[in-house]
Image: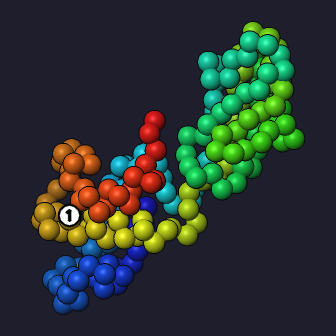
Amino acid sequence: MTAPITINEFRSFSGLPRNTNMTDETLQHILDTSWALIERYCNQKLISENILNDIYIHGTIYCNTQGSNIIIVPRYFPVTDIQSVKYSSSANGAFFSLEDRYIYDRKIVIENSPFESGDYGIIKLSYTHGFITVPEDLKTACIHVADHLLSEGFFPSSGALSESALLPSWLTEETEKILIHYRRYR
C-alpha cells in the first residue's frame, strides 16, 4: 500500500525541512502508516481496488415471495464499476448471471428475485471500488496525520503504533472534518 502523496509533496506542504536527517524510506513509512490510519478510521479502502466474487448469503437475500426485489449494499465504497452479478439458489448450486436484472444506486437492487419462495441463495458480486484519483482533501488529511505522527515522535524504528494511536481521539478537529465525509459506519 502506498500513500497518495509523494515525499516531496509532504515536505513542501508540511514545512518539513529538506535537510532533515530522516531517510526517504522512513518518511514513506510514515506516510503509508498515516494513510493506513485514515483508511481504518474511514472503515474502507480509499484507493481503487477490484473485488472479485464478494459473496452475500442466506439471511441477507432471503425472499418471502418469488418476484420480490433483493437489495444488497456492497461492502466497499465508492463503487465505480460493476463487472458481474451472479446468483445460485440452494436447490441448484450453479451460478447464473443477473446482468440485465439489476440497477445500482449506492445499493444493488435485483429486480424480480430469481429465488423460489422460501428459498435461500448466494449472490456473487465483482466490482471496482475506491478513488482512481484521490481527492485533494484526503491528501491534505494524510499530511495532517503524518505531521501528527512526527510531532508525537513516531518513527518506524520505535516499533508499532499502540492501539490508542489507532483511535480517532487524536485526530485534530480539522482532519476529522475532512474524514467524516468519507467515513463508513458498519
Which residue reaches farthest bottom?
19
User: Where, by quadrant of the figure, is residue 57 drawn?
Assistant: top right
Residue 135, compared with residue 98, is above or below; it is below
At label 1, counting other C-alpha atoms closer than 10 Å, the crowd grade (few under 14, some 14-19, many 20 or more) is some
Query: In the image, 76: left or right of 183?
Result: right
Q: Which of 45/186 is in front?
A: 186
Does 147 appear above or below 179?
Answer: below
Q: Position of residue 169 (x, y in %)?
A: 21, 48
- Report the residue at 20% width, 87% height from top: 17
Q: Residue at coordinates 17% horizontally, 56% vertically from top-left?
A: 159
Task: Name the amino acid, label 1.
Answer: Leu
Whether residue 155 can be seen here: no
Viewer can see residue 37: yes
The residue under the point 62% across, 18% down is 59
Secondary structure of the residue carrying numbered label 1: helix
Question: Residue 31, image x and y in percent?
Answer: 32, 68
Q: As drawn, is 113 to the left or to the right of 161?
A: right
| Among the 4 quarters of the image, the one containing residue 132 | bottom right
Q: How is the image coloured?
A: rainbow
Question: Residue 23: where, in percent of width, then height?
Answer: 23, 79
Task: Indicate the quadrant containing the N terminus: top left, top right, bottom left or bottom right.
Answer: bottom left
Residue 22: horizontal and vertical position, in percent?
A: 19, 79
Quick check: 156 left or right of 1? left
For image coordinates 70% across by 38% down, the residue present is 108
Residue furthest to the top:
118
- Residue 152 occupies which quadrant of the picture? bottom left
Instruction: Give the residue number, with chain letter if any, for mark 1.
Output: 149
